[in-house]
Image (cartoon, rainbow, N blue to C red):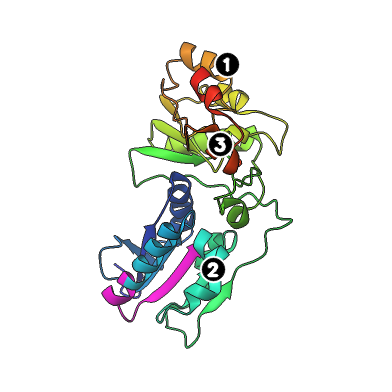
Amino acid sequence: MNATKKKVAFHTLGCKLNFAETSTIARSFSEEHFEKVPAGKKADIYIINTCSVTDAADKKCRQAIKRFIHQSPGAFIAVVGCYAQLNPNEISEIPGVDLVLGINEKFDTARFISSSEKKDKPEIHSCELSDDNTFNASYSIGDRTRSFLKVQDGCDYGCSYCTIPMARGKSKNPGIPSLIDEAEAIARGGVKEIVLTGVNIGDFGKSTGDNLTELIRELVKVNGIERIRISSIEPNLLTNEMIELASHNPKILPHFHIPLQSGSNRILGLMRRRYKREKFQDE
């Protein structure tokens, strides 16, 4: 083993989408210069990919940051992702933090860490997302028996309680051919199950004029992939066409996670959800 290799650990908070992105970030660290170790071990560098859906999520992020600083006081601490996008200055005030990267910048984490030496003052890179339409392709591989494939990002819904549109910008997705290429790469890695992930995956196609059903029709053709799982999908975006496809194709697991924030139409209205209780019952 190269004695000059730096030990780098990755810790993910939040959703399956974050796990897919952390895996992608980790692959950008060359094995020639870095040795990947579990987050519970001593490391020279910690990359913490954060969530910021609620105040409780923010609190968990702060606790994780402080835990790794305590675990390895001399380690280089990089905090990236949604919480870093929304509250970079708050994070930079935590003693021991060296680097803060927003939602797009985090994919260049390896480039930003030119050295693992501690900084006198945290470096912050967190850009505005108001007109941003950047899609950073991501999938997980090597750390689980299934792969999380990112098919969509951002959200246009603007629910009253949710910070995701501010953290990740508007709804966007890549074209179907590029996702098929990624699915084929996953299959070549020996993974047989893909979980489709995103912020609002039922909104897939807004950038390209496609839709989620069309994507799944193509994914089931990928050799080596035996199971396709659909993560959370809004009740107003689950179509009969999609249900019909799932019912006739054994590769598509017969399970839909359809979230219901409240059984009260009044509360759903205050939350600015795009469905009523009756829509959920009909599904």
Instruction: Kindly check if marks 3 and 2 are in contact, taking CB atoms under 8 A apart as contact.
Output: no
> At x 63% / y 33%, what residue is drawn?
177
92 over 183 or under it: above or below: below
The 10 Å Cα crowd at callout 1, few under 14, some 14 to 19, many 20 or more, is few
Please indicate whether residue 25 sits to the left or right of residue 45 in the image.
right
First of labels 2, 1 by sequence position? 2
Quadrant that contains the N terminus: bottom left
Is 70 magenta? The answer is yes
Q: Position of residue 192 (x, y in %)?
A: 38, 30
Please indicate whether residue 91 sits to the left or right of residue 130 in the image.
left
> What is the span of residues highlighted in magenta in the rendered image?
67-81
What residue did someone put label 2 on?
87
What residue did someone put label 1 on?
240
> At x 70% / y 51%, what residue is drawn?
133
Q: Amino acid at mark 3?
A: Arg
> At x 59% / y 49%, what residue is drawn?
160
Q: Residue most toward the front?
A: 266
The 10 Å Cα crowd at callout 3, few under 14, some 14 to 19, many 20 or more, is few
What residue did someone put label 3 on?
266
> At x 31% / y 80%, what residue is drawn?
73
First of labels 1, 3 by sequence position? 1
Camera-near label (1 vs 3) is: 3
213 over 19 or under it: above or below: above
Is 157 magenta? The answer is no
